Image: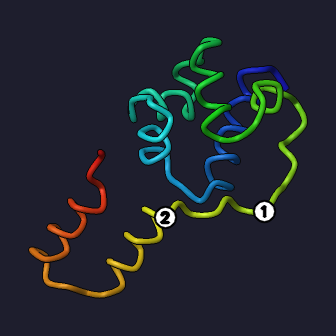
Amino acid sequence: MDAAKSFRSNFSYLIQRAQTNPSAFAKSAGLSGPLVYAYLSGKNVPGLEQLEKIASALGVSVATLIGDDPPKSSPPRRPTPEEMALAVLSALKLPKEKEKAIRAILLETP
């Protein structure tokens, strides 16, 4: 398998393993959503700087990301406190206005 196909396959697998979606991953990695989708579809191939960002955000090496061997399975990553709080908030079924206000507080950056 060529490096571009290996990358697409490994990248897709690692996003799933991280229990996220391409849009959320893009935001967490500091990349644009359309760029991540272009990488996943094969319309674009990342350069070294983007590969390093992607690998870092996924907790793997660049070699794992572009290698022919599929990444080793490992336990799913633990949700961040913010992700856990948002999940609990969603489960509470609050009125939309209250949920929106609480969400804004939870996602506030210092």
Q: Do the CB atoms of the residues marked 1 and 2 lie less than 8 Å apart?
A: no
Residue 18 pos. (x, y %): 63, 54
Camera-nearest residue between 94 and 33 = 94
Locate the N terminus and report the quarter of the image it occupies: top right
Give the side of residue 4 with respect to residue 45, left or right: right
Neighbour tally class for label 1: few under 14, some 14-19, many 20 plus, Cα within 10 Å = few
State the residue lying farthest toward the front. 110
At horizontal 24% and vertical 65% (from top left) the residue drawn is 103
- Please, what is the three-letter code of the amino acid marked with disc 2? Pro
Label 1 residue SS: loop
Residue 81 — which label?
Answer: 2
State the residue lying farthest toward the left. 97
**Above-or-below relation of 33 to 90:** above
Camera-nearest residue between 28 and 66 = 28
What residue is disc 1 on?
75
At horizontal 81% and vertical 20% (from top left) the residue drawn is 2
Residue 72 pos. (x, y %): 87, 48
At horizontal 26% and vertical 52% (from top left) the residue drawn is 108
Quarter of the figure with residue 73: bottom right
At horizontal 26% and vertical 87% (from top left) the residue drawn is 93
Quarter of the figure with residue 82: bottom left
Mark positioned earlier in the residue sequence (1 or 2): 1
**Above-or-below relation of 1 to 106:** above
Give the side of residue 41 with respect to residue 85, left or right: right
Number of the front mark, 1 or 2: 2
